[in-house]
Structure formats: structure tokens, C-alpha cells
Amino acid sequence: MATDPKRIYDLGRPEKRVDGAAKVTGAARYAADEPVANPAYAYAVTSRIAKGRITGFRLEAARAVPGVLDILTYENFGKALKKPAPGPDGGPTTGTLDDARIWHDGQLVALVIADSFESARAGSYAVQVDYAEERPTASFDDAGAQEEASSTMAGDNPHVGDAAAAFASAAARVDANYSTPPQHHNALELFSTTCAWEGGKLTIYDPSQFMAGTRGAAGMSLGIDAASVHAVSRYVGGGFGSKGPNPRSAWIAAAAQRIGRPVRFVVTREQGFTTATFRAETRHRVRLGATREGKLVSLQHEGSELCSRPSRYKVGGTDATARMYACPNIHTAVSIVHADRNTPGYMRAPAETPYMFALESAMDELAYELNLDPIELRRRNDTQTDPVSGLPFSSRSLMKCFDAAASEFGWSRRATKPSSMSDGEWQVGYGCATACYPANSGPAAARVALMPGGKASVQLAAHEIGTGAYTLVAMTAARILGIPIKDVAVSMGDSDLPPVVIAGGSSNAASTAIVVANACEKIVARKANGETGRIEVYEEFVPPGMPAKSIVELAQGKVGLQGGAGRKDVTAFSFGAHLVEVRVHARTREVRVARAVSAFAAGTIVNPLAAYSQFMGGAIWGISSALHEHTEIDRRAARYVNENLADYLIPVNADVPDVKVLMIPEEDTRVNALGIKGIGEIGIVGMNAAIANAVFHATGKRIRDLPVRIEQLLEA
Ligand code: MOS
């Protein structure tokens, strides 16, 4: 184990991306770029109804399109898989070719296979599908929405003391409802799968955040050994939770087997909205009770999330919100509501982005109720002890983040009263919120070799989803082996390499840096013992507290992460603080974010250069979450209507002000051997609340339903 702090902190010298040149010159190979011999092309036909059954297909015209080789529907292909593809929770999901049932609008109903992409597309336009249509349920509040109460659901709903009684007798109270909208990841790289068989061995080129999972899920669906599946994903053009094991890969593999030729399938942007996952809309009721001095005595958070009909997937963020502040009485619950929609899934900080919006908005409301500065309210409720389990936080520098950000921001200039600061025609408001994310790690293996000439190779099936993973691995090896970073050759993105846990849950840096550091330290020790020649080490890392067999299960595609509130020794979270200034135009009610300062304490920062942009990218996505993103639904048809990058609003440069990131030094000796807490997701968390809170400070108008819109500010 690496325990030399000097070595740990030497990791914090910035490095430019080792794959930067490959990316900007186009040499970096993404999944759909991988060459295969003589590929056929698949194009999807998707459902135009949201609920009902397919009653028949009329395929003559499509078959007559030149170049069309085959048309796959449930009638001729529904039994092609041994086991249906699992959803994001491992349970049943929507959107496959299994049978005649239609679960949601835009569901995959046929695949047209042709000699060229153009022929497949032309063929798909000629496919006619007949349906028996039923009236669909779009979302919460629509007829037919089915609620599944929290008591029947798996997962934690933290509960301490008697929150209802404490709330009833509290001196100050907030009781408010909040909501967040459906959102789609919209990674620049489209979803795709390319499958090629050679004998009984399958190669899948699929943009994947978890190639062991991609391999395992495909093997299971096809009824073949995972060892016969080779998953390749050298670069991913944005994952954000959407690019993992999915139903699409196995269907394309079966199609390639059926026609005896490799098949390439690139999903259109529009079809990606319905054939992959998304962030579901959520609703929250938060009740906070406090003493006059601002000490919380009761915290209650009830969440509700939209889901598809067959799945029971939920993100359930009360594991985080229940632990943010010292409070003796806590009640939480999460329910899901089933409607005729595609199955949701992970999207950057899946739980914390919506749930912390609710909690941090309510904390702001409580601060005004108490006539207390909102940062001071958080200070009075700060704690080094997890209020649910009583365990210590591995480290928690929340107030250091607030203090550093406040000083940089000039928070002391904030007027106490809402709607009292202005600049010409603009109302000015300051807002703040807490950011948090569980510090996770997972099993990982790596093979490191040091050559006699001083060059090294590092091999591991880790994932470059845009985070700088190649650079992190290369710099970790270079620093410990004492060689230049250019002399380290890193191979990743291939399931034949030693397995690494999912690039998700912000776990990648800790898991890969630790296993690579451990391997390199063994090489250094062997060299010090006089060994010469090529020195190779194969190393496995399983986080303390996880069973040793986790590494074997990982190779079969099972996700195992350890961290957050799931540990027996400490509770491990990263913390941060967002401070923003917004300006709301006095007459048009246009909202602009004028500036933002975000401070984070996330243990060891391996590469400050990559970390700065990761934090800033998260903060900008938070601005998007507050003011822009909303997948609009035509409720009569249960259909997404802005399923393209023109109508799906995201911030452009003109929407993004000066976003300043502060990295607060934090030495965490308990979280893991290198003190790395992970930074991939925390940046987005809380920014939506900070902006809504600033809008309140500017205008006196509390917006509890995201995104904040002009029309909400026009109402008196
Ligand atoms: Mo992340 S939503 O764990 O890719």
C-alpha cells in the first residue's frame, strides 16, 4: 500500500493529457470508427405509439429497397436471445425486440439490415407497422400512473428518532415541495454497437463505461461464456452514466450471427432519447424544523421518481441528503411512479443532482425564515459525524469550502433582505448551496512492466470517458517508477486486459491509481533488491471491507463499489460549496448567471489540470440544470418533443460567466491508501439550488420547480 505522503502529494503536479494530440487530430478511435471487414449496417425502426401492441408488419416495400438484406422484428427474431437484456437495476426493462408489446414511444420495433447505412435507413422509412393503440400515461398526475410506495422498495431510507414530533414542536419550520424535470445525457458521441463474430468468439465495439459489464451482459443474453466475448471501447465521447451494459449490444450481436457478417449500428440522436436511458423527473417534499438559533431538530425528505412500467429502477438520493447536517431526528422515503415511458438510468450524480436541489433549496428557505445568513446556517449545522450511523466522516471540509469561496466571491457584500440589490435595470442576487458526492472505489487489476531501458507499459481495462483516465494512469506510474510520463505506454479500453470496475460513481481515479501505484511500488522494491531485466507485476486491488471474490465477479460484469454511506468504518463523501451571482432583468425577467465560485475538497487531486476542467464542467452542467435542460413531453402521446440538440437547451458560451474553481487541499488518511475521493460528479451537485436561491435573493420569488423560467418570474 502506498502510504508515503510525499509520494501521494507528488501526484498533485499537473499534467497535460497524454491523449490530447490523438483526440484533436482524429487519431483517437471511438467505437463506431473501429474498422471491421465487410460490415452490414443496421437502422432502427421505432414505435410511433407509447402503449399497446404491434398487430402486424408490412415489409414488402422495405424488402424491395436495394441493398436491404434482412428485417428483424419480434416475429422472426424475438427468440434470438437466451435471456432478455436486464435494465439498469438488473431487473426487466423496456425497448427490446422480445415481443409485440409497446412499453413507450420510440421503442425499438425493428432493425433493418442492409449493405450500406443509406440503404438501411431508406429501408427503415419503408417499414410499416400496425398497432393496437391504448391511451398512454406520460408522467406523474396522468391517469394510469401507478405509485409504488417506498416500503416495498430495496435500498436505504435513513430514519433516526422522531422527526414528525420534533417538526411539530420546532420554533422555525419549512415545509415545501420541489421538482426536477426529465433530462437526457446528450453526449456528443451517439450510441452505437458494432459486432463481429470469428468462430464462436464475439467482438463488440460499443462505447462503454464498463466493458466487463458490456461483456457480461452480452454473454448472458446470448447464452455464451463471457470469456467468448471481447468488448472494445478505447475512447468514449461522453458517458455521464448512459454508456454501459445495454440491451442494444446483444441484439446486434445476434443479428451479426444471423446474417453471417459484422453489423454496425449507430443510433440517431432522436432515437437515442428513447432507446437508451435518461434522468427521470422527480418530486420532493422537504420539511425542516429548527431552533431559533438555527440548529436543525427535524429533517424529513420524501422523494418520488418516474419510472417505466416493468422496471423498478430508482436513484433514491436520501442516503446523501439525510447525512448533510447534524440533526437528531430524520425521516426519509422514496417512491417510484410507473408510466408508459422508457426506463430511466444513471445520469451524472444521479441521486444527488435532484435530491440536493430539494434539500439545499429548503435550507435556503430556512435561513430566510430565521433571518440568518445561509452560509451561517450551514455552519451551525456542520458536523464531523454522520448523523444517521454515528460514524465519523473520513474527512469533511465543507465549511473550509464555504469560507474560501465566500472570500473569493465577496459574499460579505450580500444585502440581507431579498430584492434589495440592483445594478441599473437588473435585480442582483447572491445564492449558495452545498455540493456533495460519495467517495467510492471498486475492484481493479493491472499489469505493469518496466523494461531494462527505463520504459514502462501499463495495461488495464479502464475507461477513457473524457475524464483524463489515460493521463491519470500514466502519471501515477511515471511518478512512482521515477520515469518521464512519455515513457509510459498505457493500454486501456479492452476487456481482454485486467478488469477494472465501472467508470461510474466517481470511482475511477481512486480504483485505478491505487492498483497501478501498488504494482509500481512492487517494481520499485524489486529493483531496489537488485533485480535487473524486464520486471512485470500483475496486481489486484479490492477495497478493504469488500469480499476478495469481488475481483472475480467484476470480471463477469458485476458492479461492486464501496463508499459513501455503505462503509462500516467511516462515511466517505467529498464536499463543496457553490456561490453564484444572478441578475434578473426588472422588466423582461431574463435570468443571467453573472459569476460563480465553486470550491471543492475531494482528498488527493491527482491531476489538478484535468480536475479543474472536470469541476468546472460539472458546475456548468449545474447551470444547465438550473436554467436550461428539460426534456419536454407531449402528454397526450407520452412523447418527447425536443429530442435533438437544437431544441434541447444547454448553456452556450454566452450563458456561462466567469466560473471560478477552488480546490481546497484535503488530506484524507481514512478514505483509501492514496486519499483520493473522486471528482467526476460533485461539480454538478447543488449548483441548481445555488442559482434558484440567488434568484430568490434577487427577486423575492422562490422557484421550486426546475428549470427556472421567465414565465415563473412574470407571475406576481
Ligand atoms: Mo456516472 S452517472 O456514475 O457515469
Image (tube, rainbow, N blue to C red):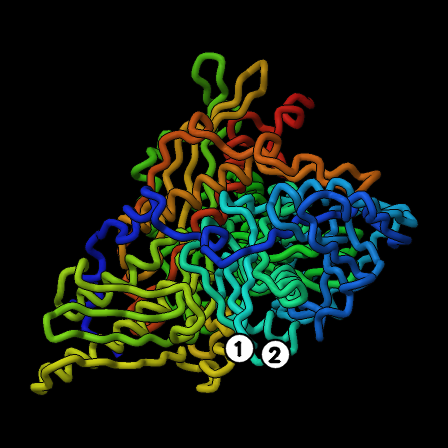
Question: Which quadrant of the figure contains the C terminus?
Answer: top right
75 or 325: nearer the viewer = 75
> According to the image, label 1 marks what residue?
228
The reply to whether callout 1 and callout 2 are in contact (CB within 8 Å) is yes
Q: Is residue 282 visible?
A: no
Rendering coords of residue 337 (x, y %): 77, 56
Residue located at (73% from left, 39% from top)? 633
Residue located at (37% from left, 36% from top)? 659
Rendering coords of residue 636 (x, y %): 84, 38
> According to the image, label 2 marks what residue?
224
431 or 283: nearer the viewer = 283
111 or 370: nearer the viewer = 111
Amino acid at pointer 1: Ser
Residue located at (76% from left, 53% from top)? 109
Q: Is residue 160 left or right of residue 283?
A: left
Q: Is residue 200 left or right of residue 99?
A: left
**In the rendered view, would you say 172 is above or below 226?**
above
Alpha carbon of mark 1 to alpha carbon of mark 2: how far?
Answer: 7 Å
Q: Is residue 8 left or right of residue 255?
A: left
Amino acid at pointer 2: Ile
Label 2 crowd (10 A; few <14 / some 14-19 / many >=20): some
